[in-house]
Amino acid sequence: MTNESSRDDTIDQRWRLIVLAPLTLAAMLFLPGIGERILYSGDEARYALLARNMVETGDWLVPRIGREVHLEKSPLFIWSIAALSLGHREVTELTAVLPAALSGIAGVGATLLLGRRMFDGRTGLLAALILATTWGYFWHARLALADMMVTFFIVVSLVAFWAGAADGASRRLPMALFWLCLGLGYSAKGPAGLMPLLPCAVFLVMEHGWRGLGRLRLRRLNAYRRGNRD
């Protein structure tokens, strides 16, 4: 028993180190100097101005710039900027970009989990390291845009899908997380957040036929669990 416990502790410690490695690398790449760059693009400035109006007026329901209503942007990313700006009651270059940087770091961790669940720990580690050092991902993690936030929710939704429906053991909690992440992704960047639906549906049809689509429905999970046991 002592040897088995010691072996389990060693595995846990090794896994913690594996998780920390890509997260630390991502933080070292994405965070330095993000508050020193001027928000020069139109979309970045628009997100910052919408968040500033929320902080200054207290109206978090309808995004506005001055008196002009702007409903073309989904609100979640704007809310995150405004929330991080509440401490000093001011939207800065740092608080405008920080939600994207943090989402980018979290997305690297979610990629590690997805790779580990679908394949193994080494595959997850390599996928996370490759993602963290990809130029496009690095660049967008340092912009005041919603791309990193929606990417994070997409990857987490895939982790939940694989845990809840794809591996043959339909479970209610992971599928609830799957749908929650789709909703949050939609709130972050509109229809782009719903992109996982198509590949997940195609996968289920190819693996289980058209009836496999029922695995996406929360109310049908118990029935599928009973069917798998039979």
Image (spheres, rainbow, N blue to C red):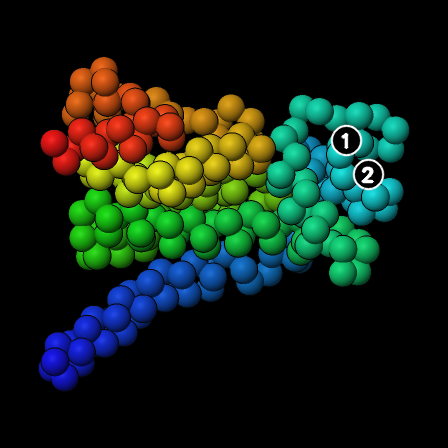
Q: Using the image as rendered, state which of residue 140 and residue 22 is in the foreground.
A: 22
Q: Residue at x 19, y 73 (%)?
A: 8
In the rendered view, does 202 fall on the left or right side of 84? Answer: left
Q: Using the image as rendered, state which of residue 103 and residue 211 is in the foreground.
A: 211
Q: Where residue 85 appears, x then y in whole percent?
A: 73, 54
Residue 77: which numbered mark, if any?
Answer: none
Question: Can the viewer see residue 38 in this picture?
Answer: no
Residue topped by disc 1? 62
In the rendered view, does 99 fall on the left or right side of 205? Answer: right
Q: Where residue 12 appears, x then y in whole percent?
A: 26, 70
Query: Quick one: SS at disc 1?
Result: loop
Up/down of 187 relative to 34, above or below:
above
Q: Using the image as rendered, state which of residue 103 and residue 129 is in the foreground.
A: 103
Q: How many marks?
A: 2
Mark 2, other Cα within 10 Å: few <14 / some 14–19 / many ≥20: few
Q: Residue at x 83, y 44 (%)?
A: 58
Up/down of 121 relative to 169, above or below:
below
Residue ranking furthest to the top:
210
Q: Residue at x 82, y 38 (%)?
A: 59
**Quarter location, residue 201:** top left
Mark 1, other Cα within 10 Å: few <14 / some 14–19 / many ≥20: few
Q: Where residue 27 appears, x then y in whole percent?
A: 47, 61
Badges 2 and 1: C-beta atoms under 8 Å apart?
A: yes
Question: Can the viewer see residue 214 in this picture?
Answer: yes
CA gap, disc 2 to disc 1?
A: 7 Å
Q: Quadrant of the C terminus?
A: top left
Q: Amino acid at mark 1?
A: Val
Query: Quick one: SS at disc 2?
Result: loop
Q: Quadrant of the N terminus?
A: bottom left
Q: Amino acid at mark 2?
A: Asp
Residue topped by disc 2? 59
